[in-house]
């Protein structure tokens, strides 16, 4: 069971406004992105990695499910499925990684370092090799090799 993450599309942007959603349990966050403004509904179902409190000025990566219908309005409005808050100069990637920790599209090879945190989506330690799962990976530097390699700061295993 669990979610199908294959349709998740990332939108990278900076939060410039947060308002109450349709009820007290939901919010609307407005992101300024390279392609203009994108609005996201955030509700109790939205996974927010590390339970970070969203604030204005934060850079985030918000994922929506491209298979869900969206209202044809401008600016675009999506249901946020997952939100990650990268650190400074950090990138976030959501990909299936095989047993050798190679991304499904061969775009990235992971090396687990001593300081790499490997956890489940609800913050628990993940005691196995993270390969063979959808992984949300927080990393900054990559090698110039093919594929690029990185030792991530954090891996979140989407079991």
Image: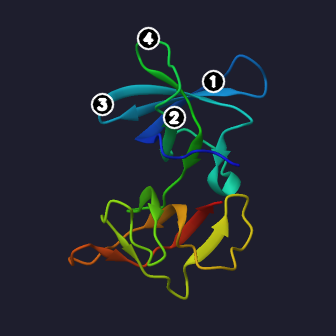
Measure how far apart labels 3 and 4 are at the Cα level.
Answer: 15 Å
Secondary structure of residue under mark 1: strand
Q: Which residue is mark 1?
A: 19
> Could you say which quadrant of the image residue 33 lies in?
top left
Measure how far apart labels 2 and 3 are at the Cα level.
Answer: 18 Å
The C terminus sits in image quarter: bottom right
**Disc number lying in front (4 or 2):** 2
Q: Is residue 96 above or below residue 127?
A: above
Say whether residue 144 is visible. Answer: yes
Query: On the picture, is 27 further left or further right than 103?
Result: right
Secondary structure of residue under mark 2: strand
Q: Is residue 144 above or below residue 81?
A: below
Closer to the N terminus: mark 1 or mark 3? 1
Q: Which residue is mark 4?
A: 73
Asked whether 101 or 72 is in front, the reply is 101
Asked whether 134 or 26 is in front, the reply is 134
Asked whether 105 or 39 is in front, the reply is 105
Q: Is residue 7 above or below residue 94?
A: above
For image coordinates 21% across by 78% down, the residue present is 145
Q: Is residue 69 above or below residue 15?
A: above
């Amino acid at each position: 069971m669990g979610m199908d993450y294959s349709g998740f599309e990332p939108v990278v942007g900076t939060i410039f406004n947060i308002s109450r959603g349709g009820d007290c349990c939901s919010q609307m966050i407005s992101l300024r992105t390279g392609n203009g403004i994108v609005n996201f509904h955030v509700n109790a179902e939205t996974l927010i990695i590390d339970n970070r409190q969203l604030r204005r000025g934060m850079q985030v990566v918000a994922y929506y499910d491209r298979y869900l219908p969206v209202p044809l309005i401008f600016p675009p409005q999506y249901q946020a499925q997952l939100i990650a808050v990268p650190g400074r100069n950090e990138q976030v990637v959501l990909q299936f990684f095989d047993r050798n920790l190679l991304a499904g599209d061969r775009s990235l090879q992971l090396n687990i370092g001593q300081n790499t945190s490997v956890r489940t989506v609800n913050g628990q330690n993940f005691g196995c090799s993270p390969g063979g799962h959808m992984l949300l990976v927080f990393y900054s530097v990559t090698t110039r090799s093919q594929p690029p390699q990185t030792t991530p700061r954090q891996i979140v295993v989407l079991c």
